[in-house]
Image: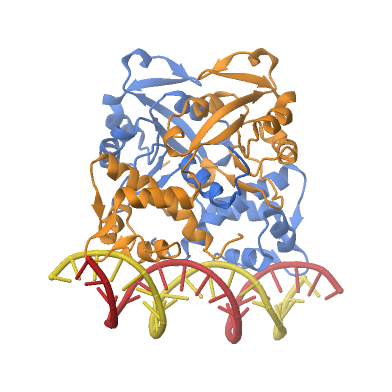
Chain colours: A blue, B orange, C yellow, D red
Amino acid sequence: MRSAVPDIVVRRLPIYLQTLCRLREDGVEEIPSHALAELLDISAARIRKDFSHFGEFGQQGRGYQVGKLIRELQHILQVDSIWPIALIGVGQLGHALANYDGFSHNGFRIVALFDSDPAKIGTTVNDIPIQPIEQLEGEIRRRQLQLAILALPAPQAEIIVDRIVMAGVKGILNYTSATLHARPGVIIEHINPTSVLQHMTYYIERTSS
Amino acid sequence: MRSAVPDIVVRRLPIYLQTLCRLREDGVEEIPSHALAELLDISAARIRKDFSHFGEFGQQGRGYQVGKLIRELQHILQVDSIWPIALIGVGQLGHALANYDGFSHNGFRIVALFDSDPAKIGTTVNDIPIQPIEQLEGEIRRRQLQLAILALPAPQAEIIVDRIVMAGVKGILNYTSATLHARPGVIIEHINPTSVLQHMTYYIERTSS
DNA sequence: GCCTGTGAAAGGATTCACAGCG
DNA sequence: CGCTGTGAATCCTTTCACAGGC
């Protein structure tokens, strides 16, 4: 990664941010590191050290102001304005993602849908029209989309990555089972329920069946 | 975690396993650590050291036999037979998961669906009937289900965790936005697209809105 | 020769523990 | 007094580099 801040720290920031947003909704205005630590099952020192990479956000004797810390984290993560996203592949998972309302309050909005099935073209999901896959590059360029979510069949994934990276996409969230290889300057992340389940079963003592 | 093997190593095993399965499908029978390393963008030494926690699976001068290594990893991860899973919450995401065919070849099968919406009870998804949430504990006990996937509204998640843990569930895959707190002997993992996207945007240079 | 498995070395991350501030 | 921010110490992970086997 291209920063002085360790990537493992950056990966924790979204957790902090989302937890703080929930606290704010509950009316919490101030919180010390040890209380946040307990909520998240990690150590208070880690939280303080994580934040210290970016500045001094707390106040001695009191803790952190929730609202201020949220704004700092949103700024650091660059989610203080909305990122428009292209969603490629509108099957069942794509439908669920297009309708997911967790994006909108966290800095993202799916603004364009693409699918290769002619029967779907022109229909809408969550008021967003599904466009033919042929229009992918044109639309990404026109709207300057930098993020894309892949929810299409795995065999098509690598080719689509080539196309969208050419068109300017810099971050790709991969829901397919394909292992995509990195391109310089492009971040690819994989969401894979099988891996998570297989990690869990390592620790579970089988009782039967 | 309760083992001598570092958890970070365990987390990589599913990636190795799934990659090896793909290689086997492509007809690859043998692979040296450096080739696997290149596919996965990690170092060959790490792969060898990871495997070395569990035994000696390779052969000098040749590498690893793909089929043998797959069986070893399946055994280590306990996915050499099928884990039945309860899926709780059959909205759009739940539908997508119930129909997802990536589970079946990797050690898992969703065998029971639950929802609190009376209109859905009795209908089936992928030939699995949706049952009322009241039957949750009974069905988990009867079928001795040890894994559950949560795909329901976040506010209900914590209560459901209590109930399914009481009924014997040992591993929970949490698709809700709720931060669930740990119970002794129960593994809870969170899949959260917002966190992944927010991690990506940290690294992307914004060119425009 | 090629490749694994592994001690030893290097590099990171987390925790400790406390100075210093409100 | 309570809490942050942080150097120092500890702990953990990765890489190096090579002995030994095929």
Instruction: Residue B105 in the image: state x and y as whole percent.
Output: 42, 35
User: Residue B187 location in percent, x, y?
Assistant: 63, 49
Q: Residue at x 38, y 38 (%)?
A: A177
Q: Could you say where residue A27 lies in the image, as x and y percent from the top left? A: 77, 45
* C19 up-or-down from B112: above or below: below
Q: Nearer the viewer, residue A139 or C21?
A: A139
Q: Please identify the quarter of the rendering in which residue B147 is found.
A: top right
The residue lying at 64 percent from left, 55 percent from top is A69
Q: Relative to the observer, which residue lies in front, D10 or A149?
A: D10
Q: Position of residue A37 (x, y in %)?
A: 69, 59
For residue A182, say whether it is visible.
Answer: no
Foreground pick, D13 / B109: B109
| Foreground residue among B123 and B31 | B31
Q: Name which residue lies at 28% across and 32% down.
A: A137
Up/down of A130 relative to A74, above or below: above
Image position of A15 (left or right of A8)? right
Question: Can residue A25 be seen in the rendering of this structure?
Answer: yes
Q: Position of B49 compared to B99: left or right?
A: left
Q: Is residue B145 left or right of residue B193?
A: right
